[in-house]
Amino acid sequence: MNRFDQDLPCEPVDLRWTTRREMTTVETKRRSLAKALSWRVIAWSITAGVAYLFTGRVAFALSVGFADSLIKIFAYYIHERSWMSIDYGRAPAMVGDADREFARVQP
């Protein structure tokens, strides 16, 4: 018996006719961290650039950018993970609709 033969709380879905968008996914901690890191690279560049424009000092601008990023990357990660527990703006997954639609048009 493989993991797909286990009793499921809902009817099985034939994934051959299901698009990626219709599949239900979860946000992993690793993905949240990768998003936080990629955003911090962008934000660090902006912060350091603005600090350089105001001061004209490269070392100071880089220091401000790094300090800002170290603080905010953890704040963003906590913010992102907190939103995982909030239902606001979520819609129920419609996984089975694609199968019913496909069955309707088949001869």
Image: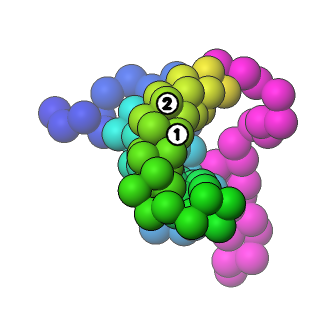
Instruction: Locate residue 89 relative to residue 17 in the image: left or right.
Output: right
Residue that protrudes farthest toward the left in the picture = 1
Residue assigned mark 2: 71
Please say whether residue 1 is one of the residues in the magenta stretch: no
Q: Which amino acid does label 2 sit on?
A: Ile
Q: In which quarter of the image is residue 58?
A: bottom left
Instruction: Locate residue 63 relative to residue 68 in the image: left or right.
Output: left
Q: In which quarter of the image is residue 90?
A: top right
User: Residue, x 61% and y 59% (percent of image)?
Assistant: 55
| In the depicted structure, whether residue 21 falls above or below residue 89 | below
Report whether residue 67 is seen: yes
Report whether residue 32 is seen: no
| In the depicted structure, whether residue 16 falls above or below residue 86 | below
Which residue range is magenta in the image?
85-107
Label 2 secondary element: helix
Residue assigned mark 1: 68
| In the depicted structure, whether residue 21 falls above or below residue 73 | below
Q: Which amino acid does label 1 sit on?
A: Asp
Tell me where residue 13 appears, x and y as whole percent.
52, 49
Q: Are marks 1 and 2 in contact (CB under 8 Å)?
A: yes
Image quarter (top left, top right, bottom left or bottom right) of the C terminus: bottom right
User: Residue, x 57% and y 66% (percent of image)?
Assistant: 56
Q: How many labels does the image show?
A: 2
Q: Nearer the viewer, residue 72 or 12?
A: 72
Label 1 secondary element: helix
Label 2: few (<14), some (14–19) or many (≥20) C-alpha neighbours in 10 Å: few
Tell me where residue 66 appears, x and y as whole percent.
42, 45
Please say whether residue 91 is one of the residues in the magenta stretch: yes
